[in-house]
Amino acid sequence: MSSSMRRRLVAGNWKMYGSVVRNQPLLEGMAAQAGSLREVDCAVCVPFPYLSQARAQLKDSVVGWGAQNVSERAEGAFTGEVSVSMLADFGCRYVIVGHSERRSLFGESDELVAAKAEAVLQNGLTPIVCFGESLDEREKNVTEAVVSRQLDAVISRIGAAGLGNSVVAYEPVWAIGTGKMATPQQAQAVHAFLRNKVAALDAGVGEQLTILYGGSVKGANAAGLFAMNDIDGGLIGGASLDLAEFMAICEAADR
Ligand code: PGA
């Protein structure tokens, strides 16, 4: 299959930024401008308190919305946690799981990330499962070993079939929020590696898997990334807080 047959996605990750007042024009602009996109899906993952606002402002648009984290548990006495069914209640289509900030700052293990991905799938939502190496790991030449280990944990829990209903994001930790984007060739190499690993288990799932790149993507550097055969879109942090930048990235993905 050629890359043009895979579904493309550009998803914003607002992280812990926003306010009702600041979100309003951003969501309104996305809803208005995304309608002209043809070949790319567009979504935004917002902090939990703004899911209601995202739904209200995006429900009549082509823009999907989702969360940045979720509990792996269904319900119970788990103070402060949010379940997948709660996200479904707010019309979420996507949930980011295993973002490197969750792994490194909040101690999420490969196994916990896999359990979260499984919970998301069980509720019919789409996990955006993140993988990536640190600068130290890249310099030690263990990038493939690290992303392999992270991917294997997910595969052992949800199988290739589960990945068929998931989106994967490759986000080198050293490129996140640093302004140091991976070169298109560096990203492509890891994307192809991940795709080949999945394809070895299930050729069809490997070929159709949407693999996003994340890490310092901007309007100005997006086209070079999206020109690579195995890069099917982006997971966008900082630039997703700026309407013009975010829409420029979406347009770059819309061949
Ligand atoms: P960035 O973040 O675009 O600000 O580098 C990407 C991410 O963390 O998903």
Image (cartoon, rainbow, N blue to C red):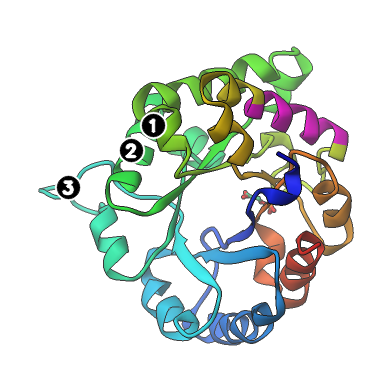
Q: Position of residue 54 (x, y in %)?
A: 45, 77
| Residue 122 relative to residue 75: left or right | right
Is residue 183 shown to the viewer in this render? no
- Dot 1 corresponds to which residue? 114
The quadrant where residue 49 appears: bottom left
The residue lying toward the viewer, choosing from 136 and 138, is 138
- Dot 2 corresponds to which residue? 118
The quadrant where residue 100 appears: top right
Q: Position of residue 197 (x, y in %)?
A: 60, 21
Tags 1 and 2 touching, CB below 8 Å = yes
Is the CB atom of the residue marked by disc 3 within 8 angstroms of ligand 1's nearest atom?
Answer: no
> Which mark is in front, 2 or 3?
2
The residue lying toward the viewer, choosing from 103 and 233, is 233
Region in magenta: 185-195
Please tell me which residue is depicted at 37% across the width and 31% down the height of the picture. Answer: 158
- Dot 3 corresponds to which residue? 78
